[in-house]
Amino acid sequence: MSATQTSSTAREPFGTRIRTWWNGLSRFQQWGLLIPLVAVVYLLPLLNFFPLSTEPGTNYEIALFNAARMALLAIGLNVVVGQAGLLDLGYVGFFAIGAYVAAVLTSPDSVLYGDYPWLAVVPIAMAVTMISGVILGTPTLRLRGDYLAIVTLGFGEIVRLLADNIPQLRGNQGFQSVGGPPGTYADGSPIFVQTDGAPWYWLTVTAIIVVLILVGNLERSRVGRAWVAIREDEDAAEIMGVATFRFKIWSFVIGAAIGGLSGVLYAGQAAFVNNQRFDVITSVLFLAAVVLGGSGNKVGVILGALVISYIPDRFQVISEYRYLIFGLALIVLMIFRPQGLLGARQRLLAYGRQAYRKLLGRSEPVATESPMQDSGKGVNA
Amino acid sequence: MNQSLSAQVLAQGESWIGFDVGLFIDRFWANTVDGLSYGSIYALVAIGYTLVYGVLKLINFAHSEVFIVGAFAAYFTFTALGFRPGPTLDIPMIEIVVNLLLAGVVAMIASGLLALTLERVAYRPLRKKKAPRLVFLITAVGASFTIQQLFLLWRGANAERAIRLLRPEPVFEFFGARVTNIQLTIFLASLVLMLVADIFINRTRLGRGIRAVAQDPDTATLMGVNRERVIMLTFIVGGVLAGAAALFYIMQIPQGVLYNGGFLLGIKAFTAAVLGGIGNLRGALLGGLILGIAENYGQSLFGGEWRDIVAFVLLIAILMFRPTGILGESLGKARV
């Protein structure tokens, strides 16, 4: 975009100003603003007042949990799609694998049932999804763009069809009473039950915060810079000595692990897993969350996930039409605002920009946008 | 404890995938015949993917919906003509042929129009903005999603019950496998349509325009080719053939038409296109037939429920080992 390029007198877009202001704050000030915000987020299940409440209709706490779970998924998918620029249409496969690992290990219906503690199941599930990320990534990540998307779609479908066809995975019949985290109230009743979404919500928000910190650190690390380089121009990155294949695998693996974690949480809260929730439509919904919010922008994808998950739960009228609405939203958004609601700004040069601005007292000379907006490699450009 | 557990898993795990070589050999020719008739449907749909990819370098993800709209159009034509789901009616042959042709034409028009609309509404604004390819694919996914949901809201999640005008009757034997009149019609009609498409692309003026844009859009524009018109034409040709395939699909598949019935077929047709060499018209035919046959062989070898997995595994395998397909990408290659 050339808006920031033209002159310093031109008014910068609102998002840019917010970002500049935020990046200008010290780490201490940032934390000072974040902690009350996080506190409000944690208090949401208790703040069941009119504009937020989903009454009458769906259970408010469970709606919150579902939104948080979707946000976690979106953060995971954002690592793959937003950071590394690999369009993954089979992300639901990792979500399914996480859910199934939890179900297979903790449901009495399973032949592998043992009295495994839930806290041991989580790392196992994440390890299995990471391994499946390597299995999917190793052969397919040599492909680019559209082809990669189709292959990942095939992978997601294969996972679902395996769940359909392997008798031990119980197909439509599914697994009952999947385990959840330990813990009881003072009177001995368990905290994590299917009917009460609030503890699950708090757990998921905690997981989101941990994941955000980890992913944020990764983004600022060598790995994250390699991802941005791959996203912007894979060939150039390769020539400049970035081991593109290895970093693409990393993004797949990390994205997969987060998807798996989300699957475990889903399986635990629903306490039931069968083959019905892991189809391509779900996968596209995840993608819609990421693209809607702003691919590559962590705050954006969380917002996108809330829109995708919470709005239909809040407004029952549209819940029947939600897939239609999000399908249309994808088209309209791609035509008018390809970078999503909150566009990502390339982080690679962020620190360089700050320095430049401080030195010369004006905005940066080069302004780059997300890969959803660059115009160099268009279709028959 | 652990050992008995793993033994238990193994004991139960034995049966989940079969290798029934006997059945494979017994049904070899029957599967070949079935595969050829399914494969010709895949091939017709695959042309839509191949042409659009050749001209725009775009995987038109919504092409599966172009196909299913054709299937619905054919179905509604049958109902409008007074046919009801259920057992085949006994009507004279000439009437059957006229009705089938009518439904086919309606399906082709509906599919062609939808393909054109998609191009105008979803892809053209992006082309004008010179959007990156990822954006095109996401739009295509969104369009596919939208059309599917519209049909879900309109017709519900249950398949329309099949209407069959033509009763399957064996016409002749092929190495002991019975070939029905339906299979023969589908195979021959598809071959004729493919031949027409091939002649159209390779011999006519308009076809030359398509090939020119596929090879080098800028030079083609300089040489006086109207690029927008060529792209429209490409979408229409692909859509019309998908409409024809939709009619054959209705004739072939007894389960009827379902709102998301296009998805799987679309993936298979795309697999066929990639298998033969995406961007290559003859490759689409070859890929479609091979995929149809492979799928049917896989079905008797591994068991019916693995049929769809064969297509997906084949897709991944081709893209990994030979992404340019058997015949290579060639729509844009100059032929003297």
Image: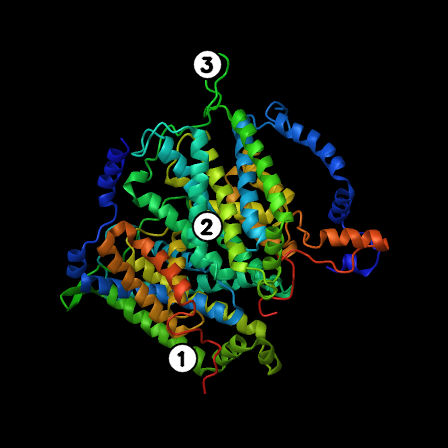
Tell me the mark number nearer the camera, choosing from 1 and 3.
3
Task: Name the outermost residue toward the top.
Answer: A187
Q: Is residue A115 above or below residue B222?
A: above
| Residue at the (56%, 31%) spot, across then down | A64
Residue pointed to by mark 3: A188
How far apart in space, not on screen, are marks 2 and 3 (Cα)? Answer: 41 Å
Residue A370 falls left or right of residue A74:
right
Q: Secondary structure beneath disc 1?
A: helix
In the picture of the structure, the residue carrying the numbered disc 1 is: B199
The label nearer to you, 2 versus 1, is 2
Instruction: Using the image, name the chain to which the residue with label 3 belongs.
Output: A
Name which residue type carries label 2.
Gly
Amino acid at pointer 3: Gly
Q: How is the image coloured?
A: rainbow
Image position, residue A248 (x, y; %): 52, 55
Q: Nearer the viewer, mark 2 or mark 3?
A: 3
Chain identifier of the residue bearing label 2 in the image: A
Residues at marks 1 and 3, common chain? Answer: no
Circle on res. A90: 2
SS for dot 3: loop
Instruction: Report the quarter where the N terminus of chain A lies.
Output: bottom right
Query: Would residue A145 appear left or right of A124 to someone viewing this image?
Result: right
